Amino acid sequence: MPGKEKSGMCALCGREVARLTQHHLIPRTRHSNRRNKKRFSRQEVRQRRIDVCWPCHKTIHAALTEKELEEPYNTAESLRSHPEIAKFIRWVRKQPATAKVRVRRTGNLREQTRRRRRP
């Protein structure tokens, strides 16, 4: 059920939460990339998703660019191994599932964005 929210266990932090979202392991904006078309079937690209809680989903997109998500971080295991995401997961596991968690963009991503905007 794409786009539908459900309850269950987060694939990254392992917490049982009332609201899970689907994270595309290969970002939808990168589906038509030539390299992805060679490496993965169309069906595989669309089906490579994991159910994650909102805080973990926001942290993934705050820490990594779409390009990084496409290549080195396109599995749940590789996402868990990313230093910033691993640190967040260690912290969020201690929080109750009902806690409101605020996620901030990392300075590293802001620097990358600034560099792209400059001519």
Image (cartoon, grey):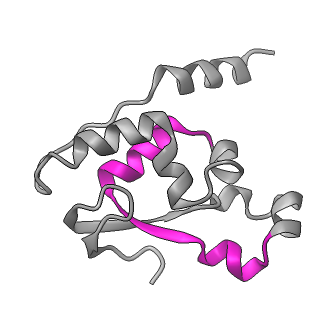
Residue under the image location 20 percent in, 65 percent down: 17
Q: Where is residue 29 in the image (x, y as percent from the top left)?
A: 68, 56
Locate residue 70, reporting x and y percent.
Answer: 69, 53
- The secondary structure making up most of the magenta span is helix
Q: 69 and 104: which one is in front?
A: 69
In this picture, residue 95 sits left or right of residue 11: left
Q: In this view, does 116 lie above or below 49?
A: above
Q: Give the range drawn in magenta.
A: 40-65
The spot of residue 54 in percent (x, y) is 32, 55
User: Which quadrant would residue 3 be assigned to in this image?
Assistant: bottom left
Quadrant of the image occupied by residue 39: bottom right
Residue at image coords 10%, 52%:
96
In the displayed structure image, the side of residue 106 where residue 87 appears, left or right: left
Quadrant of image for the C terminus: top right
Tell me the residue at 71%/50% (across/down): 71
* Image vertical order of residue 88 relative to residue 28, above or below: above
Q: In the image, what residue occupies the spot 47% across and 68% down?
A: 50
Q: Does the magenta stretch include residue 60?
A: yes
Quadrant, the N terminus: bottom left
As for residue 104 lying within the magenta part, the answer is no
In the visual, does 63 lie left or right of 20? right
